[in-house]
Image (cartoon, rainbow, N blue to C red):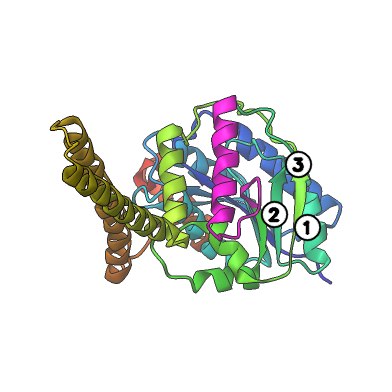
Amino acid sequence: MNDPILTIVVPCYNEEEMLPETISVLLEEINYLIEINIISKDSKVLFVDDGSRDRTWSIIYKNSLESEFVHGLKLARNVGHQNALLAGLITACKTSDCVISIDADLQDDVGVIKDFMQKFREGFDIVYGVRKKRDTDKFFKKATALGFYKMMQRLGVNLVYNHADFRLMSKRAVEELEKFEEVNLFLRGIVPLLGFPSTSIYYDRKERLAGDTKYPFKKMLSFAFEGITSFSVTPIRFVMLVGILSFITSLLFGTYFITLKFLGETQTGWTSLITSIWLIGGLQLIAIGLIGEYIGKVYKESKRRPRYSIDVNTLNLTQQLMERNLESNGGDHRELL
């Protein structure tokens, strides 16, 4: 077969500290893979700027002028990691045979991209990058992450254990992914649903070299909750089960207290009454809130709003046009930022 055209998609949000190193490392990897005839000379790296507030887009645009392998996709506003990643995958798919998604922090091992491509050549449409171990994680993060994967499996969601968003997808896999029009996006759960031939490559995750993590505890918690409620109605069923058990328990206690009344052994007191009110009230509020979360998701889906808007796409700009725009602005590329 001819050497496949590969596009490496890198979602970025406020990554000015890390981006120069990321660009250098990925360009070196692209050139190496071209030299050993693993990928086509038309391969490239597509950086997706997810509404960054620092110099991320300036760095991407400047490097796109200097290297034929670097391209940028600037979104009109911040839409979140999953939507930014999807925008990059769909855009890259139009000019590629396969795409690889990787985060800008370079914690994922770029050295296994060669193994990804070998698996693609063997006929696999999806290749998952899976961590061998979590030694670099702190205890709390490690415990919560493992707990999340186990919970999702028990809820019936087919996730690849210890896999984030470092993966290879063929052109037809991305085209099939594009058909999933849901707004509440959780790619780690959607990709396994595609059903195409898949395999896994195991690697050791590295420490972040610069900048801060874009997934603090609050964001990780929100991301986990999004994944759970997007792929399973089990939480609602659990709340219903709790309601049934609570109702049965109240009947038993009611029977018990009526028996005590007839035996003349009742004692007045507020503790049991107040405790019951707060318990039942809390359960009701939790149930209403959880049901409201699902209704909110249905509301978002029904509006069918676009998941992202593209401001600038250098893949659609010729080098000559980009240079002409640069000259017309007096050598200042900020006009397109």
| Image quadrant in which the N terminus is located | bottom right
Magenta stretch: includes residue 162? yes
Does residue 199 sit above or below 145 in this rendering?
Answer: below
Q: Type of residue at label 3?
A: Tyr
Magenta stretch: includes residue 106? no
Furthest-right residue in view? 36
Q: CA distance from mark 3 to mark 1?
A: 15 Å
| Res 57 seen here | yes
Image check: 156 left or right of 81?
Answer: right
Density class for disc 3 (Cα within 10 Å; few <14, some 14-19, many ≥20) is some
Q: Nearer the viewer, residue 28 or 118?
A: 118
Q: Which region shows up in magenta?
A: 138-166
| Image quadrant in which the C terminus is located | top left
The quarter holding residue 137 reads top right
Disc 1: which residue: 117
| Res 94 seen here | no
In front: label 3 or label 1: 3
Density class for disc 2 (Cα within 10 Å; few <14, some 14-19, many ≥20) is many
Q: Nearer the viewer, residue 21 or 156?
A: 156
Disc 3: which residue: 203
Residue drawn 41% across the image and 67% down it: 182
Density class for disc 1 (Cα within 10 Å; few <14, some 14-19, many ≥20) is many
Q: CA distance from mark 2 to mark 1?
A: 12 Å
Image check: 24 left or right of 178?
Answer: right
Image check: 110 left or right of 210?
Answer: right
The quarter holding residue 123 reads bottom right
Q: Type of residue at label 1?
A: Met
Q: Position of residue 79 (x, y in %)?
A: 38, 51
What kind of element bears circle 2? strand
Disc 2: which residue: 128
